[in-house]
Amino acid sequence: MIGLAALAMAAGQQPAAPIRPPVETGAPAAAAIKADPALDARLAEVVALLGGSGDPAVTFAPAFLAQVPVAQVTALAEQLRTANGPVTQVEAMTPRSPWSATVKLGYRNAVADLQIAVDPAGAHQVIGLRIAGVAPRVATLAEVDAALAALPGTTGFTLVRLGEGAPVPVMARNATRAFAIGSEFKLVILAELVRSIAAGERRWTDAVTLDGTPLPGGAYTQVAKGTAVPLREVAERMISVSDNSATDILLRALGRDKVEAMLSVVGIAKPAGMRPFLGTLEVFKLKGVEGGALGRRWAAADEAGRRALLAGDVAKAPASAIDGQMFAAGKPLQIESAEWFASPADMVRVMDWLRRHTESGPAAEARAILAKNPGVDSAAEGWRYVGYKGGSEPGVIAMTFLLLGKDGGWSALSASWNDPAAAVDDGRFAGLIGRAVELAGELAGH
């Protein structure tokens, strides 16, 4: 759980990636979790604050307010009311423990998905709050798609049923259009790892020894040279929290050529959109060295020229040359060229490939990795299994789900939104897609 800074999602800023519990996959139901009365009381205070009354200094723990001042709490609450109308009521609350819960909070014109946690000790003040999405009140998938189509920039969406043959579309718009997809590209790296494990070439317990090669931000950036890390651990961090350092470690361990060879195998219709297959540090160099000069050269080059650029000036540029504030203004940076590109139809095919190749044997462990972060907690409740990967940066957001219905049938859903002119509203998009997952689950449950 992260602090109220995550509430900024509703104002269009970048979301952080929380670690969420895995989704149940058919295990016997546990005893119902009951919220402690202190959680109920603090939730009521949060609802009052979002409605325009109450005292943040009473509700939130001091450590929380040290990260997010009272003025920011008040301003964000006002922004939410301005965009969505007044707060109406708590429409649903699902305890995750006696001290934490997911909540659907009603506004006049929208529903917000909240995650809240209170301190089990002391005065039980709020120590974590996240708005995972804000969706307009929509009753059908067609209404979700209409709301997506009305967003600035360009959106694409597809929901498919999965079976023995090719995915069968249930709904689609701009489904074959290529979008910048951000960190969704990491699914292709996972697919190559799955392939190699299923073929007996690797095991989840195999270790990668860090060799001191520079890494982008993440858990392994400052880890000492010579440290051995298991493939299972690296893959889980790459998918569940989108760790960029883990991503680059795994890409190098597997080999760029091997990952590129998987593009057409997993169903990417136009593999050239991801060739050469970039690591995250390479993208940061393209966008962030000398004001994006390397990225402009990348955009002007053909594939051979791009490979030469990666091997030459991109490799030589030190990580310290990257502008650490390049995303601070929230403006899209070269999202039409220095990115990974795939369509929503591509991404459901990738998820279908992963489904087909993780049914049994050692590769099946990948399903647990994909389920570690279900993307939208509340939407996950209507499904027996949810696998998920998303991606975002200013001007880009994408979300893709692998879904097992209560009827035993498989589905996949993918959506993307690009706007090269302005930052996209991550919270609004996540709310709409979360609602789509809910509605698709209702269909699958019948």
Image (tube, rainbow, N blue to C red):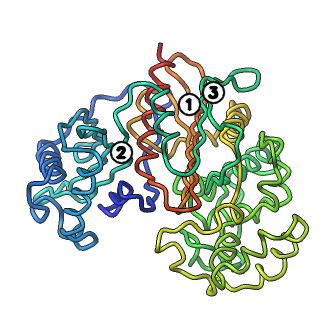
Query: Could you tell me residue 395's position as x and y percent?
Result: 54, 59
Quarter of the image with the N terminus is bottom left
Please tell me whether mark 1 or mark 2 is closer to you in this view.
2
Residue 162 appears in which quarter of the rendering? top right
Secondary structure under badge 3? strand
Q: How many numbered badges does the structure rendering display?
A: 3
Residue 68 appears in which quarter of the rendering? bottom left
As rendered, which of 444 and 394 lies closer to the eye? 394
The Cα atoms of the two marked residues, 1 and 2, are separated by: 22 Å
Q: Is residue 286 left or right of residue 311?
A: left
Label annotation for residue 160? 3
Q: Is residue 78 above or below residue 299?
A: above
Q: Residue at 67%, 33% (x, y): give it.
A: 355
Mark 1: which amino acid? Leu
Question: From this viewpoint, is residue 344 visible?
Answer: yes
Mark 3: which amino acid? Val
Q: Residue under circle 2?
A: 134
Please tell me whether mark 3 or mark 1 is closer to you in this view.
3
Q: Residue at 68%, 23% (x, y): give it.
A: 168
Residues under numbered marks 3 and 1 in contact, where contact means CB atoms less than 8 Å apart: no
Q: Residue at 64%, 86% (x, y): give it.
A: 321
Q: Is residue 402 left or right of residue 105?
A: right
Residues under numbered marks 1 and 2 in contact, where contact means CB atoms less than 8 Å apart: no
Label annotation for residue 403? 1
